[in-house]
Image (spheres, grey):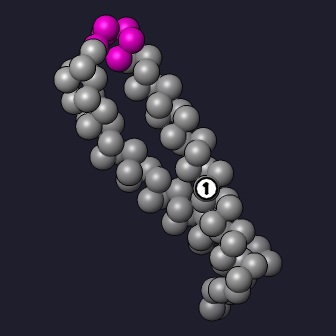
């Protein structure tokens, strides 16, 4: 089967991806804040911790966007 790619399905996919991405960023940010506050990190140490969190966070956001696109354009879901 071929994926359904209309303006409606693509906007729904973008909305779902945006919603899930915001939720993921909130969760990741909360964990970052908790770790940084627990370890009393400031300045450079906090920036290094943020860089450590950045790569898995970017991967997670790509997975979320891909899942939303796959779900919204699947003909079985229409």
Instruction: Give the residues in magenta.
Output: 36-41
Magenta-drawn stretch contains 37: yes
29 lies left or right of 20: left
x, y (%) of residue 39? 31, 9
42 lies left or right of 8: left
Q: Considering only vertical position in the picture, is 45 above or below 19?
A: above
Q: Which residue is more in the foreground, 71 or 55?
A: 55
Question: Looking at the rendering, in which quadrant would you find the C terminus?
Answer: bottom right
Q: Is residue 74 visible?
A: no
Q: Considering only vertical position in the picture, is 12 above or below 5?
A: above
Could you say whether the residue bearing mark 1 is in a helix, strand or loop? Answer: helix
Which residue extends farthest bottom?
2
Which residue extends farthest right?
78
Q: Considering only vertical position in the picture, is 23 above or below 65?
A: above
The local crowd at label 1, few if under 14, some if 14 to 19, many if 20 or more residues have their Cα within 10 Å, is some
Q: Is residue 53 visible?
A: yes
Q: Which residue is more in the foreground, 74 or 65?
A: 65
Q: Which residue is mark 1?
A: 18
Question: Looking at the rendering, in which quadrant would you find the N terminus?
Answer: bottom right
Q: Quadrant of residue 50?
A: top left
Identify the residue at image location x=67%, y=59%.
Answer: 16
x, y (%) of residue 47? 25, 29
x, y (%) of residue 14? 63, 66
Identify the residue at image location x=69%, y=72%.
Answer: 11
Identify the residue at image location x=71%, y=83%.
Answer: 7
Which residue extends farthest front?
43
39 lies left or right of 71: left
Identify the residue at image location x=38%, y=51%.
Answer: 58
């Amino acid at each position: 089967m071929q994926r359904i790619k209309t303006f409606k399905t693509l906007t729904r996919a973008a909305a779902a991806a945006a919603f899930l991405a915001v939720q993921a960023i909130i969760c990741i940010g909360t964990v970052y804040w908790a770790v940084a506050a627990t370890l009393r990190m400031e300045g450079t140490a906090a920036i290094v911790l943020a860089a450590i969190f950045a790569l898995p966070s970017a991967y997670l956001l790509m997975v979320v966007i891909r899942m939303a696109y796959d779900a919204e354009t699947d003909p079985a879901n229409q």
